Image: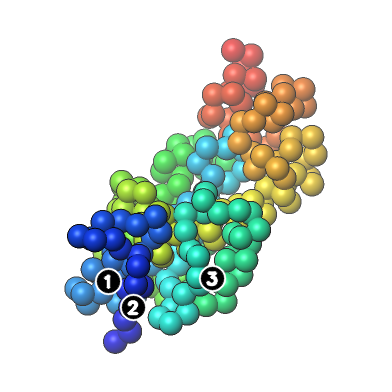
Amino acid sequence: PPFFLARPGLCGKAGRMSDSPDFSAELAAQSRGLWRVAGVDEAGRGPLCGPVVAAAVILTPGQIPEGLNDSKKLTSRRREVLFSQIVAMAEVGIGQASADEIDAINILRASHLAMERAIAALPRPPDHVLIDGNLIPRGLTLSAAALVKGDARSLSIAAASIIAKVTRDRIMVDLAQQHPGYGWGKNAGYPTKDHLAALKNLGVTPHHRRSFKPVHNILYQV
């Protein structure tokens, strides 16, 4: 069966975490016969508009890109480079939930729905999934474990965080061309000063999340 080799130097003495993610969670699953381990993460819970995007990644033995880390710790340029390497070397599934779905079922449930869709989009089902956070999506029927701050602890989740972040940023750049003035190409839909000012001056678009307070307040003049 396939296996992953732990990288030297990733764990400190007495099993303490280093500053980089490692493969200990994946190896623990594989020691129980769960060979195909997918890391799962999402991007876009905080923005006022656009979808929430999730990714599921199964890294390939011997073909793990160097420098995988929590996407928030990487520059945009570095994320783009790693994105291409991950797609070329690993199995990747991507899912999203729309702004309408976020408004209908809340952002947490929509994030989990996007995760479920990302896992379903993998070329083959995984044996086990590592979910970033402290909750497992309730629709999952696979073996799964939640890993708090997983994108800083698991290489598979770190890879998923990069795929999700880059994918969502690209979506927001495309939406920015359709709806100029909100600065989505730079702020990715987060409630920056410029975005909030544009929301007041230009109004609410179909891509805004109406259940989020700043958007709700403008719609209903609270």
Q: Identify the amino acid type marked 2.
A: Phe
- The coloring applied to the image is rainbow
Q: Position of residue 191 (x, y in %)?
A: 61, 31
Bin the neighbour count of mark 1 within 10 Å (Cα to Cα): few under 14, some 14-19, many 20 and up. Answer: some
Marks 1/3 in contact by CB < 8 Å: the verdict is: no
Location of the N terminus (image quadrant): bottom left
Q: Is residue 13 left or right of residue 123?
A: left
Label 3, label 2: how far apart the Cα atoms are: 16 Å
Q: Identify the amino acid type marked 1.
A: Leu
- 62 over 142 or under it: above or below: below
Q: Dot 2 lies on which element?
A: loop
Q: Which residue is denoted by mark 3 in the rendering?
A: 86
User: Is residue 116 visible to the viewer in this orientation of the structure?
Assistant: no
Label 1, label 3: how far apart the Cα atoms are: 19 Å
Q: Which residue is denoted by mark 2 in the rendering?
A: 4
Label 1, label 2: how far apart the Cα atoms are: 7 Å
Q: Dot 1 lies on which element?
A: helix
Q: How many marks?
A: 3
Q: Dot 3 lies on which element?
A: helix
